Image (cartoon, rainbow, N blue to C red):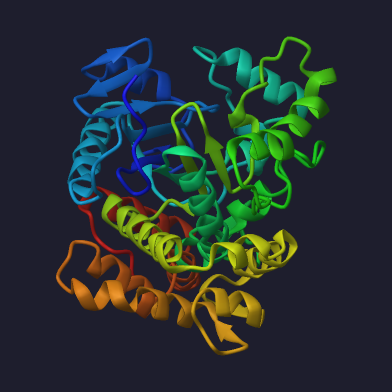
């Protein structure tokens, strides 16, 4: 095995998209046909050089990812763009296309959920038996996962502490799921709202979504993983789910690949926007990792961070953060700030240092016009849900920003 990468020595990105009927935009459960038809397919998984496609849980979802850590994000927007183009070309022959965004706005999970019946089906069947996968928190959600590496306990502890601080603010930058069941839910990030409740039957699995402070792998295993395994043992006697990915917190340690996986970022309108959000998350995490007070970062209560996350899930970029201690840890002296202003302040060094970088335009769109959730709300109010969602699909195909 190769030596683990040091913190920020690489990055792994996973992007999830829903497959929809090209005419009606209803979800279409044809991921198996797509993956079987693609060049480079083997057992419903596709490999294209350093990129791959696969499925998770439901038949209308496809996941695109870089298969090995990339040294930087710089080459990934174009790489993901090529994969999306190939997928859409194949889906066109099936009367389908990809829809971006974090939730399908009118999917009926009770009626339209189709679980993946191929590899890993024992895992999906166990989840369905224990938690019931016919719900928005399971079968109707698409996100971007950002994987950041670490080497050893010291790097793990510092990276985990920095991610805990960034995580609550991410919906204020990346929310894209205001609608479900063909109605405005009142949440900027309804995906994260339902995600926080998808394992309520067993609270140890998700905790408060913001992970607890830990100082080593052994500490993590004792405080987070073992209680989960103990709680689910009676319902999972064959240990099908007894793995670290059972953890449903918003950032989870993946000791199997020496990385922390951030899971709270909604899918955006095209890969360039997704990767720009990833660049923002990584840059701010790096700032806190290198210059923050580790002791102070680790001491802030998980409950306080969860309260910040909750208001950002509800209000997105309009959220107001009034925890002065938290703001000080981020480098602000104010006692109360709108989340949009926090992001402007956190990203100012990045935006000023490389004004013509590939991520500048997508981030400027968010900072100027609001989250994709806000823009979708405005567009749907003016032009109707189907027309706005068709434009959203067009943005994915053309690599354009979605503007109301």
Q: What residue appears at the point 75 percent right and 26 percent down from the top-left corner? A: 229
Q: What residue appears at the point 33 percent right and 15 percent down from the top-left corner? A: 36
Q: Position of residue 322 (x, y in %)?
A: 66, 82
Pick the quarter of the image with the C terminus.
Answer: bottom left
Most foreground residue, 58 or 155: 155
- Does residue 292 appear to the left or right of 207 in the view shown? left
Q: Position of residue 62 (x, y in %)?
A: 41, 32
Q: Is residue 182 visible?
A: no
Pick the quarter of the image with the N terminus.
Answer: top left
Q: How many marks?
A: 0
- In this picture, is 136 found above or below 86? below
- In this picture, is 243 found above or below 319? above
- In this picture, is 388 found above or below 48? below
- Does residue 389 appear to the left or right of 263 in the view shown? left
Residue furthest to the right: 234
- In this picture, is 342 found above or below 242? below
Q: What residue appears at the point 56 percent right and 85 percent down from the top-left corner? A: 337
The quadrant where residue 199 appears? top right
Q: Is residue 245 visible?
A: yes
Most foreground residue, 266 or 209: 209
Residue furthest to the left: 356
Q: Position of residue 14 (x, y in %)?
A: 39, 39
- Does residue 151 appear to the left or right of 187 in the view shown? left
Most foreground residue, 158 or 227: 158
Q: What residue appears at the point 55 percent right and 38 percent down from the top-left corner? A: 253
Q: Position of residue 272 (x, y in %)?
A: 26, 55
The quadrant where residue 42 appears? top left
């Amino acid at each position: 095995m190769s030596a683990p990468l040091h913190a920020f020595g690489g990055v792994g990105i996973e992007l999830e998209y829903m497959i929809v009927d090209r005419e009606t935009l209803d979800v279409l459960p044809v991921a198996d046909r797509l993956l079987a038809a693609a060049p480079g397919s083997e057992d419903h998984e596709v490999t294209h050089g350093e990129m791959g496609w696969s499925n998770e849980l439901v038949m209308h979802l496809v996941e695109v990812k870089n298969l090995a850590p990339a040294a930087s994000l710089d080459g990934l927007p174009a790489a993901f763009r090529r994969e999306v183009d190939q997928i859409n070309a194949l889906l066109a022959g099936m009367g389908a296309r990809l829809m971006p965004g974090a939730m399908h706005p009118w999917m009926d999970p009770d009626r339209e959920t189709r679980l993946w019946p191929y590899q890993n089906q024992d895992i999906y069947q166990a989840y369905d038996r224990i938690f019931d996968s016919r719900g928005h928190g399971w079968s109707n959600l698409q996100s971007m996962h950002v994987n950041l590496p670490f080497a050893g306990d010291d790097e793990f502890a510092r990276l985990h502490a920095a991610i805990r601080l960034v995580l609550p603010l991410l919906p204020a930058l990346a929310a894209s799921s205001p609608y479900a069941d063909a109605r405005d839910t009142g949440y900027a990030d309804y995906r994260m709202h339902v995600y926080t409740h998808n394992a309520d039957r067993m609270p140890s699995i998700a905790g408060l979504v913001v992970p607890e402070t830990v100082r080593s792998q052994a500490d993590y295993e004792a405080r987070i993983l073992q209680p989960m395994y103990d709680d689910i043992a009676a319902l999972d006697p064959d240990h099908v789910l007894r793995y670290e990915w059972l953890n449903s917190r918003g950032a989870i340690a993946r000791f199997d690949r020496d990385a922390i996986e951030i899971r709270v970022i909604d899918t955006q309108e095209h890969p360039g926007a997704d990767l720009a959000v990833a660049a923002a998350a990584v840059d701010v995490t790096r700032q806190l990792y290198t210059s923050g007070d580790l002791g102070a970062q680790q001491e802030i209560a998980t409950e306080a961070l969860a309260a910040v996350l909750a208001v950002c899930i509800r209000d997105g970029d309009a959220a107001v953060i009034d925890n002065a201690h938290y703001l000080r840890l981020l480098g602000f002296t104010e006692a109360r700030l709108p989340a949009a202003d926090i992001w402007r302040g956190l990203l100012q060094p990045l935006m000023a240092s490389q004004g013509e970088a590939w991520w500048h335009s997508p981030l400027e769109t968010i900072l100027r016009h609001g989250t994709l959730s806000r823009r979708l709300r405005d567009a749907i109010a003016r032009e109707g849900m189907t027309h706005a969602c068709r434009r959203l699909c067009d943005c994915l195909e053309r690599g354009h920003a979605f503007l109301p």
